[in-house]
Image: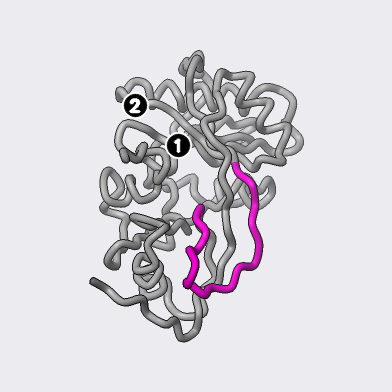
Amino acid sequence: MTVHVLDRPSWAALTGPHARFARIVGYAARYDPEVAPFFALENAADPRCWDDLATLAGPGTELSISATPPAGVDWEIHGTRGTLQLVGATVPAVPDPEATMLTAEDVPEMIDLVRRTEPGPFGPRTIELGTYLGIRRDGRLVAMAGERIRPPGWSEISAVCTDPAYRRRGLAARLVLAVAAEIYDRGERPFLHTVAANAPANRLFTSLGFVRRKEQRTVSLRVPVSPAPSPRS
């Protein structure tokens, strides 16, 4: 059975375009922690991949992954959250004349904006994953959007956020379309993930032409302190 690249986007990115950020043990991979907190498995149905993930993450580590341990893999599950994967279908991508390219010098401001708006994880080196665009008002960064996971042929739009004082002015929508334009210019297609229960975000992205590809569960787990390894053939 052929697996679509977007069914395992982090694995496809870490073993492809984002290999320079990867830490890999057997059939488990993760991003450098300063870049992104994401883990991935080559085949979530194979218990041996979870053994590799335990070795990679370390005993007692808490992590989130879009996979559920199969029978016989005794990991502590803390909770699950529904997420939607949306893909660009009829997105009218267009550059924005007010959007500026953000650089490493802007990271402190970007982290501050993320802290206040909580669009998702953003670390000191997340900016290295792709293009990040921002809009300023009176010299302050008030809105931004950028790229995160990049499996072959695709790029995830992420970190879409706006200062609360500047919301409802269309800044987020403009930046999403501008980032999408950057992605299309490279011959790739945009996709993104949202929390299924986040109705405002889902309305925004569908209004821009993104369509739902699938719903999935993000599972919060804790690596066993002393995992029992699965036999390898």
Q: Amino acid at mark 1?
A: Glu
Residue placed under numbered mark 2 in the picture: 188
Q: CA distance from mark 1 to mark 2?
A: 10 Å
Against 96, residue 12 (above or below) is below
Q: Amino acid at mark 2?
A: Glu
> Marks 2 and 1: in contact by CB < 8 Å?
no
Which sits earlier in the primary sequence, circle 1 or circle 2? 1
Q: Residue at x 43, y 63 (%)?
A: 33
Q: Residue at x 54, y 70 (%)?
A: 62
Against 14, residue 136 (above or below) is above
Q: Residue furthest bottom?
A: 226
Residue 73 falls within the magenta-colored stretch: yes
The segment highlighted magenta reads 66-83
* Total numbered badges shown on the rendered structure: 2
Q: Residue at x 50, y 55 (%)?
A: 67
Rendered image: mark on residue 214: none
Q: Nearer the viewer, residue 112 or 199?
A: 199
Residue 3 in the image, given as x and y percentages of width and height:
34, 40
Residue 139 falls within the magenta-colored stretch: no
